[in-house]
Image: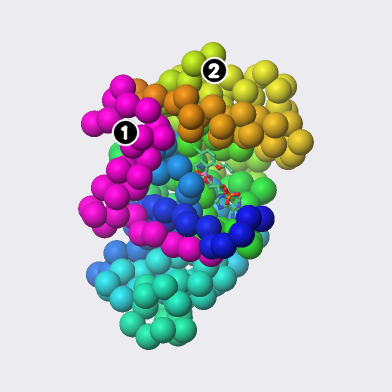
Amino acid sequence: EGVGPQEYTLIKMKVLYPQKIKDFGNKSVYLVAATMKPETMYGQTNCWVHPDINYIAYNVACGDVYISTERAARNMSYQDFFKEEGKIDIVYKLTGKDLLGLALESPLTSNKVIYALPMLTIKEDKGTGIVTSVPSDSPDDYAALVDLKKKQPFREKYKIANEMVLPYDPIPIIEVPELGNLVAVTLYNQFKIQSQNDKIQLMKAKEIAYLKGFYDGVMLVGPYKGKKVQDIKKLIQKELVDSSDAVIYYE
Ligand code: A2H
């Protein structure tokens, strides 16, 4: 990896029925998803968690409860997230399986409710272990969504109801010259990607999506419609932070 700390935007995905996990009283509970692309939040269709990773629920200083890997909470404990530096106030320990199927409300997306679904390529040692899914612009996300849509046994294995997956399609949010308005779908087809485990092909697709999306991408939705992604990325991040829908996190 590169030198120096990496900055992520943590998107606060609100759990609509936290009592399905545990009684958290009247606290708001959030899955916090680390992204490099806050400008794509208009296109969220679901959230990814790894079924077999361990997660924790913990109190943050503002009174909310966050859910992420313990590793991410440890990093937060030195970034002014908590009442006491270096100390994580754990409320509950759980695994990704406990989070699957949770209904969530996430900022900017046109989907009122989205669901926590399984992704098997999530890394435990990156970000929060929770990823927000934007299948229009992320080849990984599109590949994982297609896997779930195509493979009923995969959905059944993790008790994912059809209505959590089948109605959700990639949303055009960014136009890139030559790649169109669903960059991830274009590249998935161009590189003949078969599944989320198609590592090498996905890496090639990601590289192109990343470069072209940043330098040539133009917003199709929201208040910055018609503006270049590179000019408004920071503005969208700031708005999300100012509205308390996101926080900045380093690792
Ligand atoms: B990105 P980098 Cl639209 N395991 O957000 C696997 N992937 C993870 C992760 C983890 N533990 N934590 C974060 N990520 C994903 C949006 C997005 C992202 C788009 C396009 C590309 C893209 C929506 N998903 O990332 O290696 C998150 O997905 C391309 C790599 O630290 C995060 O941003 O840059 C990105 O990987 C961070 O990976």
* Residue type indicated by callout 1: Ser
Whole-number angstrom distance, CA of label 2 to CA of label 1? 23 Å
Q: Nearer the viewer, residue 185 or 25?
A: 185
Q: Residue at x 46, y 84 (%)?
A: 86
| Left or right of 81 on screen, residue 190 | right
Farthest top residue in view? 178
Q: Earlier in the sequence, mark 2 or mark 1?
A: 1
Question: Mark 2 highlights which residue?
Answer: 179
Q: Which mark is residue 40?
A: none
Q: Position of residue 109 (x, y in %)?
A: 34, 37
- Residue at the image position 49 percent from the left and 41 percent from the top: 133
Residue identified by numbered label 1: 110
Q: Residue at x 45, y 42 (%)?
A: 37
**SS at mark 2?**
loop
Residue at 72% over, 22% down:
192
Density class for disc 2 (Cα within 10 Å; few <14, some 14-19, many ≥20) is: some
The segment highlighted magenta reads 222-251
Compared with 62, 210 (above or below) is above
Q: Quadrant of residue 241?
A: bottom left
Q: Quadrant of the N terminus?
A: bottom right
Q: Is residue 238 magenta?
A: yes
